[in-house]
Amino acid sequence: MALMAITVLGHDRPGIIADVTATLAQRDANVEDSSMTLLRGHFAWTLIVGTDASVDQVAADLAFLASDDLVVSVLPVTDEQQEPDGPGSSFVISVHGADRVGIVAAITGAIASYGGNVTDLQTRLGGGLYVVVAEVDFAEPMDAEVLTTRLRAVGQTVGVDVAVQPADQDVL
Amino acid sequence: MTPLQVELPDGVVREVVTAPAAVLSEPCLPVDPADPDVVRLAADLLATMDVSPGCVGLAANQVGVPWRVFCLDVSAHPKTRTCHGRFVMVNPQILQASRNEKAREGCMSVPDFTGDVKRASRLVVTGQLPGTGEHVTLTTDAFEARAVQHEVDHLDGLLFIDRVVSAAAIHKRKVYLD
Ligand SMILES: [Zn+2]
């Protein structure tokens, strides 16, 4: 069985998920991981699907969505998921400030320069307030205070406050 | 305060059940704390917890036994404030819970995921000790309160997944070497 990544994008309407999953079920295609969100009426869904069908077959099955002006892409998944293999660390990074161009670029550019990988990201604009929440993994241990100091300095250059919390997970 | 530590026989390490398993999704049954099988189970829970790295508590149904018994030991955890040590409680019942706090939890029975869960940070729980059957009531907070609620949830047939705060609050567990 092969894995493929499917994305569905477009204007929201009730029943998109039901239509897609019913079509995939007819192919015996199994939705494994998926994440959907709605941004101002714009529907965005990414699915990792396991199936014996070909990419072309699945794309053809889902072609009916084009009549709703939904954009569908189907791509093979070739790379294995990389598990962290060292003593790494994870953080939730919150950013907020007056809206302007370049906030996300400045913060994520800094994170990348320290070897951090963004694994989850939400950005929201409400009123004049811009909010970013990102989950970031570092393969190497990263000190929360050092990271806070560095990101606050970067945040100052684009006028935002930055808070860093360790993404602790406690096994109970 | 009543000491919760009681004499128990040497326990045997049991295999930890992982989801999906029916025994994790059904409420556990009240038991007689003086029943020798319950005493043995109490010892086995402690033995299993002791050999599991990072494990701070285990419910009986996590070793496949649908009885209302759990063990706990948060004494080594950095988020612990009040601490009652290493103990087993039979037929636990939560009397008071207040001051919710959100934190990310994992579970030995759900090894691939973590979830953001709100739990009371002030807790009063009552139950019985294995063997003696003595009734005890403990008042706790912080991490011990969270752990007790997680274990009592197990005994009620609930996993942390049943309590996540939002659709975005379930995560793939990150496994790092210490
Ligand atoms: Zn658990």
Image (cartoon, coloured by chain):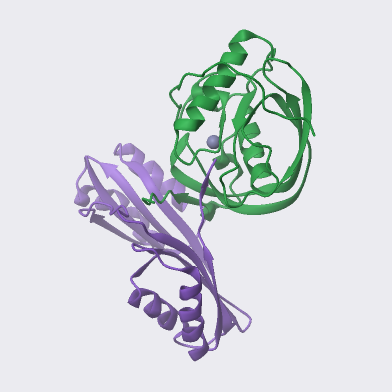
Chain colours: A purple, B green
Horizontal and vertical percent position of residue B74:
60, 41
Vertical comparison of B7 with A20: above or below: above
Horizontal and vertical percent position of residue B3:
73, 30
Residue drawn at point x = 46 percent, y = 56 percent:
A36
A78 on left or right of B154: left
Q: Nearer the viewer, residue B4 or B113?
A: B4
Vertical comparison of A33 with A126: above or below: above
In the rendered image, the quadrant that contains the C terminus of chain A is top right
Horizontal and vertical percent position of residue A164:
53, 70
Residue drawn at point x = 39 percent, y = 42 percent:
A22
Q: Quadrant of residue A116?
A: bottom left
Vertical comparison of A100 with A96: above or below: below
B93 on left or right of B108: right
The answer to whether one can see residue A42 in this image is no
Q: Quadrant of residue B92?
A: top right
The answer to whether one can see residue B7 in this image is yes
Vertical comparison of A22 with B5: above or below: below
Q: Nearer the viewer, residue A13 or B69?
A: B69
**Quadrant where ligand 1 appears:** top right
Q: Residue furthest bottom?
A: A157
A141 on left or right of B139: left
In the rendered image, the quadrant that contains the N terminus of chain A is top left
A96 on left or right of A147: right
All told, the count of numbered labels is 0
Horizontal and vertical percent position of residue B97:
77, 43
Residue drawn at point x = 64 percent, y = 19 percent:
B7
